[in-house]
Amino acid sequence: MSSIRRHKRLLFILLGALVLRLGAAVALQSYLDHRLHRQFLIEGDANGYWELGERMAEGRAYELYEPPRRVLRMPGFPAILAASIKLADLIGLSERRMLVARCVLAIVGTVACGLVYLLGRELFDERVGLLSAAITAVLPVMIGFSVLILSETAFAACLVLSLLMMARLVKARRLERAAKPAIVLAFAVGASVALACYMRPSWLPAAPLFALAYLMSASNKKTALCEATLVMLGLAVTMAPWAIRNHQVTGHWVLTTLWLGPSLYDGLNPDATGDSDLSFFDRDALMAGGMSEHDVNRHYTKLALQYAREHPRRAIELALAKFARFWKPWPNAAQFDHWAARLAVAVFFIPAMLLAAWGWWACRREPWKWLLTAGPVLFFSALHCLFVGSLRYRLPAEYPLAVLTAVGALACCSGPWRQSRTT
């Protein structure tokens, strides 16, 4: 495939992705304004993100509620919202801040599609890259979530970027390139994982897990140990500003947030069902009673672990319920409890998963290829057996998984998959 033809195809895919997402942004905003008469389709998290974005844009303290919770959310996604709010004010659309934000998020979603292309091309070839980008461009759930005031799509873009850096580091070492590029890539892996953590903290274990796998798979352990150390250094340096800020406002070193404990208790408590129900937090009102945000986090972590120890059978039942919710082919949320919404998601998700399984079989003897594509969804699936399960937590990992779906589709159409030469 010539370079000009390849670029035209990619441009067509990305323009299509952008048009679909901008259309979804306008349609959703019109629906909310004229039919539902509210700001957000999925309220709760969206309200908090938007308020934090406004506070950042206006230079106010980064906190929510009263008593103030200062380490509730990572600042990455609110920073994107803050930038969109400032943009709306700059171009004279202050009254349409929400629509401008949705359009900015549509661009972020399009960037995510482009990063999937790069990941597919890096791990496999040009055909896989283009097809995987096309898949993410047209999947209804990815289009829809791109324009919600939620962190899923921004997190997905950063997650795929971190996987791309991992793929390039593995390739550089396999091809025995000069040490300097490998050193830079190793640091970039850690920094890109940290960037994803600024969107959502659940990707934090990816850096040490990758560093360990990279070290174990290397033939030159001494060099690999140096590069694995640089991965962790890149993570630490990039996360340091947030950790320092958290120490200043709480007096404790907090690398991510102080919402881990309540989130864990949300999934492991006497009333847990596998779905999220945070009513206990307001009911207990521990901070109103004088407990600090840090102590509240520790309190709920202790209660969740205690419940799991004292009720192991129920903990297993809950884990299975969360696993089922995570992999459910259609949305769990009440907002999408309609046959058309369920069908629109399931009719794409089920074939995509089947093709991804076929793609895994085609490259099963090349572990880095399927670890960097299927690994995230398997990791989040296990993680959310502890917390709560939902399509929302699966969605970011579906972006890199689309690469395996593309491999499976090509294998299905042309027999045993063969990697073509990229030109």
Image (tube, rainbow, N blue to C red):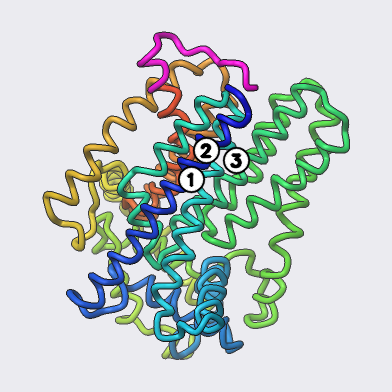
Magenta region, main secondary structure: loop
SS at mark 3? Answer: helix
* Residue 255 placement (x, y as % from top left): 64, 64
Q: Mark 1 points at which residue?
A: 14
The C terminus - image quarter: top right
Vertical position of residue 288 compared to residue 112: above or below: below
SS at mark 1? Answer: helix
Q: Quadrant of residue 30?
A: bottom left
Bounds of the magenta segment = 409-423
| Viewer-nearest of discs 3 and 2 | 2
| Three-letter amino acid code at the position of disc 2 | Leu
Q: Mark 2 points at which residue?
A: 10
Among all residues in the image, which is located at the extreme top? 415
Using the numbered discs, state the Cα–Cα distance from disc 3 to disc 2 in whole angstroms.
Answer: 20 Å
| Three-letter amino acid code at the position of disc 1 | Leu
Q: Name the residue under label 3.
A: 163
